[in-house]
Image (tube, rainbow, N blue to C red):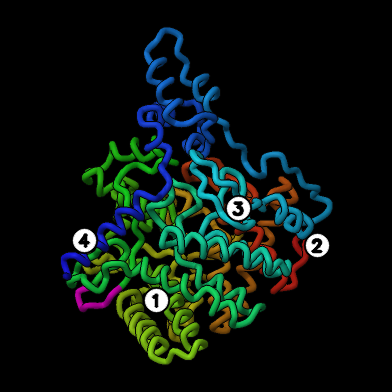
Amino acid sequence: MIKNITLFVCLLFSLHATSQQSTPSQLFPGLFEAVQSSDIFPDNKTFVDCTPKYPPAQIMKAYNEQLGKTGFDLRNFVMTNFSVPSGVTHAFQTNVEEGIRKHIDTLWQVLQRQPDEATKYSSLAALPKPYIVPGGRFREVYYWDSYFTMLGLQESKKFDVIENMLDNFAFLIDKYGFIPNGNRSYYLTRSQPPFFSMMVGLLAKSQGNRILIKYQPQLVKEYNYWMLGGTQLANNKATHRAVRMADGTLFNRYWDESDEPREESYIKDVDAAKTTKQPLPVFYHNIRAAAASGWDFSSRWFDGSGQLNTIQTANLVPVDLNCLMYNLEQTIAQSYKLKGNQAQYTAYTAKAAQRKKAIQKYFWDEETGWFNDYNWTTQQQSNIPTLAAVFPLEFNLATPAQADKIAAGLQKNFLKPGGLVTTLNFSGQQWDAPNGWAPLQYMAIDGLENYGKKALAKDITTRWITLNIRVFKQTGKLLEKYNVVDTSLTAGGGEYPLQDGFGWTNGVLLKLMNRYQFEEKKAE
């Protein structure tokens, strides 16, 4: 009987996997690699976002017939057979004189996408309700971006837009078992930092407890996705996103189910793989796991050399992820309490309490006064301090003494003229110095406020808003990231040019301007 059940479960998972959309590399074998290895599109993401004009079988038949013939031109072939996408903010020009609040209010319309019509061979995974995209090359919804975008939508009283986006995420959880990195077929092997419970909590503040009850099934499903295989793990083992520590503690890590180059960054990954000593499947898993973290890329994930070819994301238990999982456990517990299910309330409250205790044990370093990631394979803390250390403050997981030390470390080492730098390493990667990012500014500011560090929180806010507004007045744009060390320069690093739009920058900026009653004239 048990064997039959096991076979049945395996069959279900197999059917689930095969029901997912085919990716561009699967639809266009050979052609995909040729295009991504060429200079037809400077950004590998462009081709995987193209829409085929004809059925893939027809395109592949034509490609195989024409390939190698005299005069064959790959660029012309692609342009004949595919529709090329444009950036969602490509044609938008703002009037700087109307001010930054007007700019953000207008961008809610510019960045909003209407419900998708399912296109059979497009990489886009259709969503049933309107949603906000980040902007630039990011033409689809992104998981963790959306929470910080929602902070601004909350300030703009666009609660219907927030609920539409939550409905879309619930739809994705019901369809795929999790929220993908973005609604594209090539993202269906990984998720992103699990902010869904934060989004639910955000909307519940204005819409009441019905929101917690409404999305409880999806909250539980997401939790099960992150914990998959965890209960069967032996100590010092990991599977998927679950890690069992030496003492039996169950934690989570970032993970991607694929061990191949990312389709949207194919040539970057192939080239990077030429420099690593890791087996290629291991290297690609680590690259993809970093993409699942949202911090792609950062020296946070490398060894002490600070080189991409040493990436070890899957070996690290991240402090920010496990704080988010703690919040997910607490949110599920609260939803059960509202439904009168005392047993499940008690069970999830216990899970959260266990995780809180373990976060203190594994991530806190009393000597440095910092929360660090933990390498479960070496059983040592990482020695690379990052802004992920502010997450325990955001979720009230730090003691007052720990918050004092984090605040002192932020002020001494991370606070720069334009706000907080992401790490202290100038590696050339975009999630390192000198760059600052809106979501991390917000988590730090909000976390400091939780512990009464109002002066430091306001100082960070003022520097960040001032930089945002100055760049806006110069360029008419709000950007994906900023150089907070030398505010006269634009941010750099990463696998693509600096993007404008920009969903999470808009959301955090509006939230902070309203919270601190900050107007543009104060930045002049």
> Which residue is identified by label 3?
133
Q: Which residues are magenta?
A: 245-250
Q: Earlier in the sequence, mark 3 or mark 1?
A: 3
In three-dimensional space, the C-alpha distance between marks 2 and 3, rounded to whole angstroms, equals 29 Å
Q: What distance separates the C-alpha of mark 4 from that of mark 1?
A: 50 Å
Q: Residue at x 16, y 66 (%)?
A: 3
Tag 1's secondary structure?
loop
Apparent side of residue 418 relative to residue 367 in the rendered image (left or right): right
User: Mark 4 = which residue?
Assistant: 7
Query: Mark 3 near mark 1, Cβ–Cβ under 8 Å?
Result: no
| Residue corresponding to mark 2 | 521
Nearer-the-camera pick, 437 or 36: 36
> Mark 1: which amino acid?
Gly
Identify the main secondary structure in magenta: loop
Q: Residue 356 appears at what percent x and percent y?
A: 37, 82
Instruction: Please give the name of the residue rendered at 25% of the width and 74% of the height, measured from the top-left corner.
Output: 231
Q: Mark yes or no: residue 423 visible.
A: no
Is the residue marked by circle 1 packed among few (<14), some (14-19), or many (20+) residues within 10 Å?
some
- Towards the viewer: 183 or 242: 183
Q: Residues within 10 Å of mark 4 (few under 14, many from 20)?
A: few
Earlier-in-chain disc, 4 versus 1: 4
**In the image, what residue type sits under mark 4?**
Leu
Q: Nearer the viewer, mark 2 or mark 3?
A: 3
